[in-house]
Amino acid sequence: MAENETLNLKDRHSARWRALMKLVAQRPSVGEVREETVRCLYVAAKNLVELLPLGELLAAAAGDNGPVAEIVARCSIGRDYAQLFERQADRRLTRKQVMRNVFVSALDTFFDQVSFRLAPAENPWTFSSLRNFFGQVKQEGMEDIRQLAAKVASNPHEAPKMPALSEAAKEQRRRQLTDMSLLRE
Amino acid sequence: MQAITYQHSYRVTYGPCPDGQGVLASGRDFRIDEVQLAGALWCNLPPLATDFVRIGMAVYVCDRLAKRDRHSAGASGLRNVAIAVQVGSPDFWLEDGVSSLLQESLRLLSDDHWRFSFFGPGGAWQRVFCGPPPSNPIICLYSGGLDSAAGLANQLRNRKEPMVAVTAWHQPRQKQRVFRHLTMLERRYKRRLLPVVVRTALRHPPRMSSQETSQRCRSFMFAALGGAVACALDSSVVEVYENGIGALNLPLMRDMAVAARATKSAHPQFLRLMGELTTRVAGREIEFKLPFQEWTKAETVRTLSEDGLQELARDSVSCVHYPRRVPGRGKSCGVCPACIGRRQALLTAGIDEDPRRYHYDLFRSPGEFECIPQQELDYLKCVLLQVSDLAELEGGRLPSRLCDHLFGTKVIRTEEEAEGWRRLLLRYRQEWLQLIQTAGESRLGWTEWVGN
């Protein structure tokens, strides 16, 4: 059972998002960050399936099952995400669209925090260059996000299966592991 | 000659369950000076308006005493507050439409769930009072901050109706400051203003570390007070002088959008709900208005500069930590969002002020800026990050963050209504870019954070 899932980069449950931040600090390609970002979202989605009444939230947010606020009030853990459903609630949207908007919103929340932490430090990043970079990441990853949203919306009781890693990503992970010192620094 | 009748004392119980855990009595545990209120108004406060003020005060007190649990495992900071207030007309407040308005407005402000119950009156006493109240004036909430000063100056410059300035006195020396401001404004515009300053206080409060310091529901009490005065004086409008950027308070970062991490004290939807609630209390239409919704802070402040009221601007207080308990003049921190917004507005409007009033000075010299501890620069970073993000507006597109906030918090219901907000935020961004350029000439380090 997942303990919690928050939108706070500092939270101890957000380790994978912090790893993404470290990756961004190394100025990787848009493709590398896109791949990691989608994986982060899959893990978040898996946890949300366990933590939240996703079916109810989606139905309410898409406008056909009473007010979202009442369901959100029952969510003591995973509440940050539950509130995103409330914000995205729009009866003109389908459940898939609501789910996609929730994921995009979660992504923006983390990208904001990454920008906040990286930009003014001793990095070549500025707020503007990071905004452009993350804009490209989102644009390139939108199809993956749509697919993930469709999976979750069509079966909100089952954790979505993580897509297989690309060969390039596997190679990069292999390199990271072999480069890693076995002695603790 | 009129007789003023009100409860001598009333009780409030609150806690996480309906029967309440804490029992508070007015006079003993908290104070809202109803005698002072009636005296300032020169008229009887209607019974339901008295209830409204009492509920506002009860909410304010419970909001401070019910500390959020943010640290234990699984805690979300969410509070479920059950509150029972002794009022004159319990049946009215228990009506469906009324209690749901109470709950909805507090949920918007604090993100918490408030459950209300009401019980009947205790003893009452009477005092005979005489004098003619002003008829059908404009009521405005006056805090002594820069926005309220600039807003009132703008209204006095352009309008002729009698005006009543309502202040919930909750800060040290706030009363004296408000009277000084009103005197300056009366002299400048040759108008009479009716000040209604009401003392509000939690008596023998626990240490600040045991209190909920966000005080998100404080504005409910301010608005209830303004609404009650409007009921008493047959007014149909309560004006709130907050600039559009402040009223909208677009969360500086996305994670501030959830929960009650960003204040909504002058949020258009909150004021709509308070208007509906006050209308029910008065039995006639009363509206809460934001006359400067389409203005930036610098645009409202410019009036003070044009009308020779620079001293009034300097005398106002904006800092959320005011007064900092440090020796010397630096009673304002200089790095909170309110201080940053104030300095941006004053610099843009061309009003100088003594930088020594700020503990940290972000705008004077590179040397001083370098001395500011990194953790004190968080809000400046957030503001600049937002200014950078608002670049999307230039392409005619609404950033998703703005869309979520406008629709998610019910500021607007159709996309057409967003245009005014888009234009306002663009002007605000331009003001900042101009300031960044000017400050960049002085080689202030933060001006390089935004980039091109």
Image (cartoon, coloured by chain):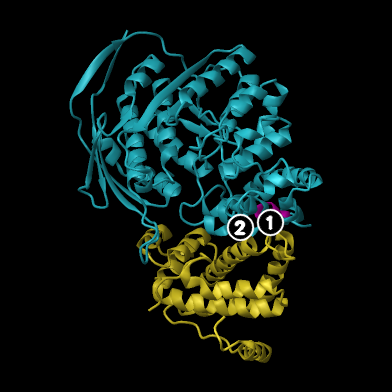
Chain colours: A yellow, B cyan
> Taking B266 as reference, is B451 left or right?
right
Determine which quarter of the picture holds residue B284: top left
What quarter of the picture does the N terminus of chain B occupy? top left
Q: Which residues are magenta?
A: B385-391
Q: Residues within 10 Å of mark 1 (few under 14, many from 20)?
A: many
Q: Nearer the viewer, residue B165 or B283?
A: B165
Q: Chain of mark 1?
A: B
- Left or right of B33 in this view: B170: right
Read off the residue under disc 1. Answer: B389
Out of B26 and B437, give the one closest to the viewer.
B437
Q: Quadrant of the C terminus of chain B?
A: bottom right
Is any atom of residue B395 visible in this view? yes
Q: Residue furthest left?
A: B123
Q: Are marks 2 and 1 in contact (CB under 8 Å)?
A: yes
The circle drawn on residue B401 is: 2
Residue type of the residue flagged with mark 1:
Asp
Does the magenta run of residues contain B166?
no
Q: Chain of mark 2?
A: B
Q: Secondary structure at mark 2?
A: helix
